[in-house]
Image (cartoon, grey):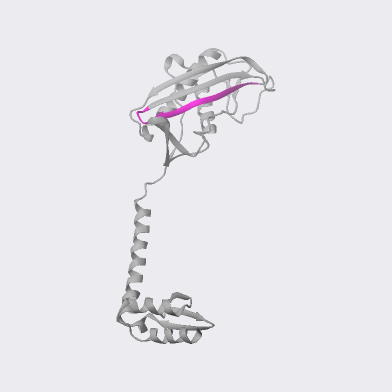
Amino acid sequence: MREANITSFQRMREPMKRPADLLIALYRSNAPLSCSYSKMGSCCRWNDHKSFYFSWRKLGTFGAMVHRHVFAVLTFFLSLVLLAACSSAPTVVYTLNPVPPAPSRAAAGPPLDPPIELGQVMIPGVIDRDSVVIAAPGGQLDVNGTAVWGGPLGEMIRRTLSANLAARLAPGSVLAPGDPAPPGGVRVLLVNVQRFWGDTQGQVGLVADWSLAKQDGSALGEPHRVVVSVKAASGDVSAVVPTMSRALGLLADRIAAALR
């Protein structure tokens, strides 16, 4: 077998007129073949106890053709990779923002005593992700990989809603997240969001349950449910996200009116 391998290798050193000659030589030799490229040129390694090397140039016209085609294919695929990287859509980062109250709902009256602090906001797992979620027909959800939130959505809702409530209640009524509690203590506002997303038609829906509790977790009164529906200019993410901020403003209107 070794002599047959060497004989096949020697035949391969001669110029080959047909591409099939190379394939026949490889088939008959039964020896593993591996190719490598270096600054000195392209070559293949023939392993059969000993190592043999030959250059593509020694394969004649066919070898030169293969050498050119290899680099042509590599250049083509590299161009495709660069083109895909340049043509991919850029990532857009979105955030929720506080919405000023209407003049009729502006802060008025004495501050709440004791004040309230918005606790952790619970959100459905389906929207608890980095990407913005848009509802599509047929019970489907469109997770847009190029439209992402600037932070955890639950924490973003908490801070936005807290700022909205502070703008609708008398000064000193709402503690911002992280503020120290006064000596008299605080009441904790618990919000459980059941639904909060827009659809491809631009309709934004928000369903949330809220209640008050003591700092030790014991309930204060019965829970309340708020249902909000706001129409965006379109179903595009750039129109849906600002409308979601408006929906949080309407939720704050309802909660503030019940707390006064």
Front residue of 96 and 60? 60
Would residue 38 be seen by someone viewing this image from the given angle?
no
Residue in view at x 37 percent, y 78 percent: 22
Query: In the image, is residue 6 part of the stretch drawn in magenta?
Result: no
Residue at coordinates 59% horizontally, 16% vertically from top-left? Answer: 112
Determine whether, in the image, residue 109 is placed left or right of residue 137. Answer: right
Which residue shows up at 49% across the image and 20% down it? Answer: 252
Taking the magenta stretch, the answer to whether it contains residue 190 is: yes
Quadrant of the snapshot with the C terminus: top right
Q: Quadrant of residue 243?
A: top left
- Give 128 or 178, whichever is nearer the viewer: 128
Q: Which residues are magenta?
A: 186-202
Residue 201 coordinates in the image, percent (x, y): 35, 28
State the residue in front, 141 or 130. 141
- Say which quarter of the image contains residue 44: bottom left
**Vertical arrangement, residue 224 with respect to residue 237, above or below:** above
Q: Position of residue 206 (x, y in %)?
A: 46, 24
Task: Give the residue at x 60% y 21%.
Answer: 116
Residue 90, percent across and down? 39, 46
- Which SS does the magenta portion mostly show? strand
Q: Is residue 127 above or below residue 28?
A: above
Residue 160 coordinates in the image, percent (x, y)? 50, 28
